[in-house]
Image: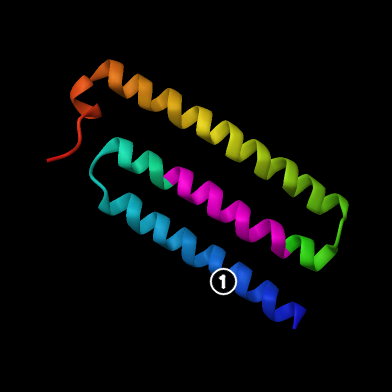
Amino acid sequence: MRTMVIDILLSAAVVCTWLGALGFTRLQHSLDRLHVAGYLSATLAATLLPAAAIEDGLSNRVLKLLLISALVLGLGAGTSHVIARAIGRHDPKMLEPPS
């Protein structure tokens, strides 16, 4: 049962990665692509962290993954905001919704 839950979580991570890659290639607007990057960091943290916790329990590897996930989520949001602001300053038309 435990192995099946881990397999489902890891499969969900793979599916989310493929959906993110597909979304990244399909979206034309730069700011929309930033949302895909945020989606990927959030979904991968939400699937890989529980899988590792189920496999190892509370171990050093899980704590490291928790720290890395928190850093990716926190810094990823800040980085996306800075990139969006730079895009807006460079070309204000990019902040308008695509037609």
In the image as oriented, which residue stretches furthest toward the bottom?
1
- Name the amino acid, label 1: Ser
Magenta-colored stretch includes residue 32: no
Residue at left offset 36%, top offset 20%: 86
Magenta segment range?
Answer: 37-51
Q: Quadrant of residue 8?
A: bottom right
**Is 83 left or right of 60, judged from the image as shown?**
left
**Is 18 left or right of 99, judged from the image as shown?**
right
Residue 77 horizontal/vertical position (percent): 51, 34
Q: Which residue is mark 1?
A: 11
- Comparing 3 with 95, the one in front is 95
Give the prevailing secondary structure in the magenta stretch.
Answer: helix
Secondary structure of the residue carrying numbered label 1: helix
Residue at left offset 44%, top offset 23%: 82
Q: In this picture, is 82 found above or below 69?
A: above
**Is 64 left or right of 87, judged from the image as shown?**
right
In which quadrant is the N terminus drawn? bottom right
Residue at left offset 76%, top offset 78%: 2
Q: In this picture, is 30 found above or below 26?
A: above
Magenta-colored stretch includes residue 41: yes
Residue at left offset 37%, top offset 27%: 84
